[in-house]
Image (cartoon, coloured by chain):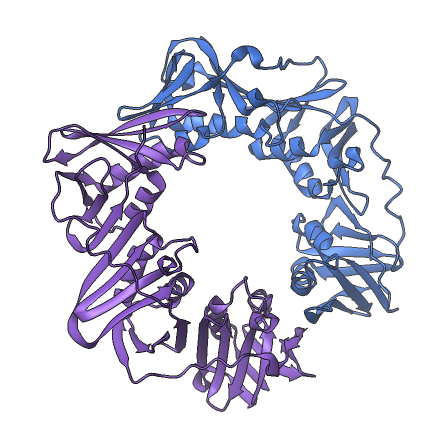
Chain colours: A blue, B purple
């Protein structure tokens, strides 16, 4: 194996490939990146056995392929090494079963893993393919993934529920204390209906590798899904099971309908959360009284805080409701809108957040009863 | 106590005051900042009992002082609170022995410490005063302080040795493996000779609060030193003892005198250190052979690296010498020069680094014998 390539091209490919790697991996060879040089170009593959990313650098983007070959390089320092190479053009060469990475004035010779130790990662296309625009995918994931559970107690909730039904594309995430649901109408209906749960890590890495406004082919299998876009094949196993039906979580009618400027509401909660941080679950209290909303925060250790926010509210009856400021801030952060609508029934019933001028996103936050 | 002040003015003063605080403090009240409001203005004081910083905000810089008073506020969230206040003008008011920090739309009421619990911090001027320009102080500290020891085994070495003798101002730091010495000729001789050891934390915080090109009055005492500049009084205890005499550490004659471009040498070592990082003390080997210098790095785990650097050397005899790449990079980072001179006698004798065009700085790095 021997080839010469532009620094930016190999660095970009490696940057995306390493996203499949996991620090939790116990099989050493899965810390490696498979480099497969053929006449067609260079294929990079990394996998943590659940998520696998394969990237093809086409031969037209390679300065020179002198000889083919396959090798597994160590990922640990590879990005740093490539970034710090002193020239814009870098050569790679197999060297006594290791790899030599070099320029005119310097060289690295890196130990490699045994090819035979690498597990078989099967990445192939399906006949069952759906094509979506990357902007739709990115937006749906970005506005919902924050609500995925970080706890393994209910494994399914650590993933994102992605559904397609006709021309309705929907992403749902919930950790059972909060929920985010994004529903987009596609320009064209899709024959095959889809209902999958993508693991949290894969969701986050998928969105980080997706460029703006490109076609993404989604190849569906029973137990895995393969996204193909640009020169990337992004394959992930799916979480096995039935995602909870959340359709009844969001009430149809509300006693309180509050219209508020997103930034004002966000800043007030952000300030209140300074002193409620740590120990006490970041609880803040919201008091609604006519067209005045007051955010209260307090902590025995630190003191208390109070802030008024102007609102429009349909109900003049006073209502106090408490919630996690962290959860509320997370929910507000993903909204791209100037004004929001807060919907409430009782102080022990969910708070619903809608964006004014954008009915595709619904967010839910459970209140916290305080005494 | 009640006053109103510009956000930027109080934030700036607090930013400097909190530098005296320490996370290691076990006396709770020393997490507080003493706020003393008088007709003259507002005095802020923080101390970890070794380092004390007092700042006076003159009454001309305060929008309004309605009443005087003294209180100890909690430092923990104070910077965040002030930063996130929604208006450019902030009011402070004593409120049931606590402090209320407020604007038109919001308020924080923060718990305060008991005034009586605060230790007596005595900050007064000395008759024994030296005045230096802040640029000289900053430059001397910045170029030497990296070599202070992080280990408490030899407490004196965790500080910076600052000496004045006539018109010679000198700062020295060493952790016994490396040394940095900066010597500046003052424009005017100083009568009193000075030889003090300033604790490491104080050295670092002093430099971080010093503005460019201002007069710094240094008030000397037996066991402490007080720096006065701007509206800041910066007082630190001294380390007690005799700093080791390092004047014989640096040889007068050398077998090898190597002239090299600083950036080329730095980058070569930086690259070699990528794979030597962690476990093996970051050792790199430098091989000098005529007008060629080669940096070698190797690690059993990762592999090896080799890089050539062009040099001019007076001695054509081959020499191999090994050293810590971390120590060498630290030493090179503080030099503001294009070319350096590396001086060596033997592979087990210190490496001396001089800056070409700047004879005020000398750096020493002990070699590491490898087998």
In this rendering, position of residue A253 left or right of residue B370: right
Given residues A286 and A48, the one toward you in this image is: A48
- Residue A258's spot in the image, x, y percent? 79, 60
Given residues B276 and B212, the one toward you in this image is: B276
- Residue A20's spot in the image, x, y percent? 59, 27
Residue at image point 90% right, 52% down = A253
Q: Quadrant of residue B65?
A: bottom right
In this rendering, position of residue A267 left or right of residue B344: right
- Residue A369's spot in the image, x, y percent? 85, 59
B255 to A27, vertically: above or below:
below
B49 to A238, vertically: above or below:
below
Q: Quadrant of residue A116?
A: top right
Residue at image point 77% right, 30% down = A163
Residue B227 shows in this picture: no
Residue at image point 66% right, 60% down = A270
Residue B88 shows in this picture: yes
Given residues B173 and A229, the one toward you in this image is: B173
- The C terminus of chain B is located in which quarter? top left
- Residue B137's spot in the image, x, y percent? 28, 66
In this rendering, position of residue A198 left or right of residue B284: right
- The N terminus of chain B is located in which quarter? bottom right
Residue at image point 82% right, 44% down = A176
B187 to A65, vertically: above or below:
below
Q: Quadrant of residue B89?
A: bottom right
User: What is the total number of numbered labels drawn onto the structure image?
Assistant: 0
A124 to B48, vertically: above or below:
above
């Amino acid at each position: 194996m021997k080839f010469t390539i532009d620094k930016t091209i190999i660095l970009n490919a490696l940057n995306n490939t390493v996203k499949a790697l996991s620090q939790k991996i116990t099989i050493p060879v899965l810390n490696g990146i498979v480099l497969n040089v053929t006449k067609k170009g260079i294929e990079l593959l990394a996998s943590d056995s659940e998520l696998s990313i394969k990237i093809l650098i086409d031969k037209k983007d390679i300065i020179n392929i002198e000889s083919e070959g396959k090798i597994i390089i160590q990922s640990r320092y590879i990005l740093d090494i490539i970034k710090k190479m002193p020239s814009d053009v870098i050569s790679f060469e197999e060297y006594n079963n290791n790899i030599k990475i070099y320029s005119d004035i310097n060289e690295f010779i890196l130990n490699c893993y045994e090819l035979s130790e690498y597990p078989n990662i099967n990445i192939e296309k399906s006949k069952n393919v759906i094509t979506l625009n990357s902007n739709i995918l990115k937006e749906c994931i970005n506005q919902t993934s924050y609500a995925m559970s970080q706890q393994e107690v209910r494994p399914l909730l650590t993933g994102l529920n992605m559904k397609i039904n006709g021309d309705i594309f929907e992403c749902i995430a919930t950790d059972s204390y909060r929920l985010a649901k994004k529903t987009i109408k596609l320009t064209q209906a899709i024959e095959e209906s889809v209902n999958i749960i993508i693991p949290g890590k894969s969701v986050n890495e998928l969105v980080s590798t997706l460029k703006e406004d490109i076609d993404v082919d989604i190849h569906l299998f029973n137990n895995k899904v393969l996204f193909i876009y640009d020169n990337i094949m992004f394959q992930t196993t799916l979480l096995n099971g039935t995602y909870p039906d959340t359709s009844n979580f969001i009430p149809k009618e509300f006693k309180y309908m509050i219209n508020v400027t997103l930034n004002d509401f966000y800043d007030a909660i952000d300030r209140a959360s300074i002193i409620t941080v740590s120990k006490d679950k970041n609880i803040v209290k919201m008091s609604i009284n006519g067209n005045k909303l007051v955010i209260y925060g307090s902590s025995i250790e630190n003191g208390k805080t109070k802030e008024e926010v102007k609102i429009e509210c349909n109900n003049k009856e006073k209502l106090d409701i408490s919630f996690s400021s962290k959860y509320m801030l997370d929910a507000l952060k993903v909204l791209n809108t100037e004004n929001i609508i807060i919907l409430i029934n009782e102080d022990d019933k969910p708070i619903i957040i809608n964006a004014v001028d954008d009915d595709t996103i619904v967010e839910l936050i459970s209140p916290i009863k305080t005494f």
